[in-house]
Amino acid sequence: MSAQTTVMPQISQFLWPAEETTSDGSRGRLNRLALMTAMMSVAFEKAGRLSRYSIEDGFEPVIMITGMLLMLPVVLIEKYSRIAVFVFCLLLIPTIYADWTTYANHSWLAVWTIPVALLFVRYWDAPLYADYIRITLGVVMLGAFAQKVLIGTYWDGSYIAYLSYYGSTTERLFQPLCSEATLMAPCGWHRFVGIFILGWQFVVGVLLLAGVRSTLFLVIEITFLLGAGLYADEMNFQVLNIALLCVAFRVGMSHRLFVILVALLFIDMHGIGNFIDHVFT
């Protein structure tokens, strides 16, 4: 039996147990949980800044983060879900206004997707909202592919080589593949990793725009996103992507996957590299 007929279905059944999706009500609740998880990644990203908080900054940051966190469980309540999303977005506006010139790409992804839910009375049951997120993610993936191609440092492997020697703990994952002598002239393995990342983003972008919603595709993509988050020590962004994919594929966020992602968000607040260094050294 192939891996597709054995391993992947087992992973899929672990992440989305059949008993969780037996009714329309369950699917709606899981879709709200998926959007809540996307919002949680944003809240955790903002909360990480409180480590640099000073009383001179005023109470606005604390009020904003507290309000955002309080709105998260309300998103799960069908009657008040849109109101919670609305309040969450209102609390987010000041940071967008203040930092829009330096706003990170993944932060803009949240801005492009989460507030659009307010346009639908029942966003958790709206195929158009799911398709909008799917198309947006597809465009973003192709945009990321085009950006990397234009820069050229992925084609020749120089960026992977640089990270392998000067990156964080996890970014040095591919260092053993080549010697330090190849740092200025990347070896074949580092070029292969760079080209693989390019190919992955291009293929995923095309499949998303083509409307492919196979569960196998979703499981593989989640696996790659988790791997990318581990390598780049940037799991917060990948949690956002995974949560939005769960909405786009109309399967929602399963309880098991939710627990895994929340644990990763907490670890990410202190850095995956720091966590690995603490555990293994």
Image: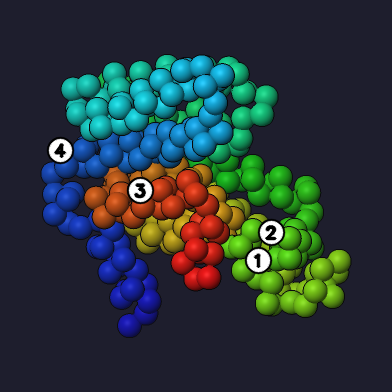
Which callout, 2 or 3, points at the residue further toward the start of the chain?
A: 2
Residue at image coords 51%, 44%: 237
User: In the visual, does 42 lie left or right of 168?
Assistant: left
**What is the residue that sits farthest to the front in this orientation?**
55
Label 4 amino acid?
A: Gly
Residue 172, label in figure: 1
User: What's the CA distance linking mark 4 and mark 3?
Assistant: 23 Å
Which callout, 4 or 1, points at the residue further toward the start of the chain?
A: 4
Q: Is residue 167 above or below residue 128?
A: below
Comparing marks 2 and 4, which lies closer to the viewer?
Answer: 2
Quickly name the residue at label 2: 167
Quickly name the residue at label 4: 25
Q: Where residue 44 sits in the image (x, y, percent)?
A: 44, 38
CB-based contact (under 8 Å), mark 4 and mark 1 = no
Q: Is residue 56 above or below residue 125?
A: above
Query: In the rendered image, which quarter is residue 85 located in?
Result: top left
CB-based contact (under 8 Å), mark 2 and mark 1 = yes
Q: Residues within 10 Å of mark 4 (few under 14, many from 20)?
A: some
User: What's the CA distance linking mark 2 and mark 3?
Assistant: 25 Å
Depth check, front residue: 229 or 278: 278
User: What's the CA distance linking mark 2 and mark 4?
Assistant: 46 Å
Which callout, 2 or 1, points at the residue further toward the start of the chain?
A: 2
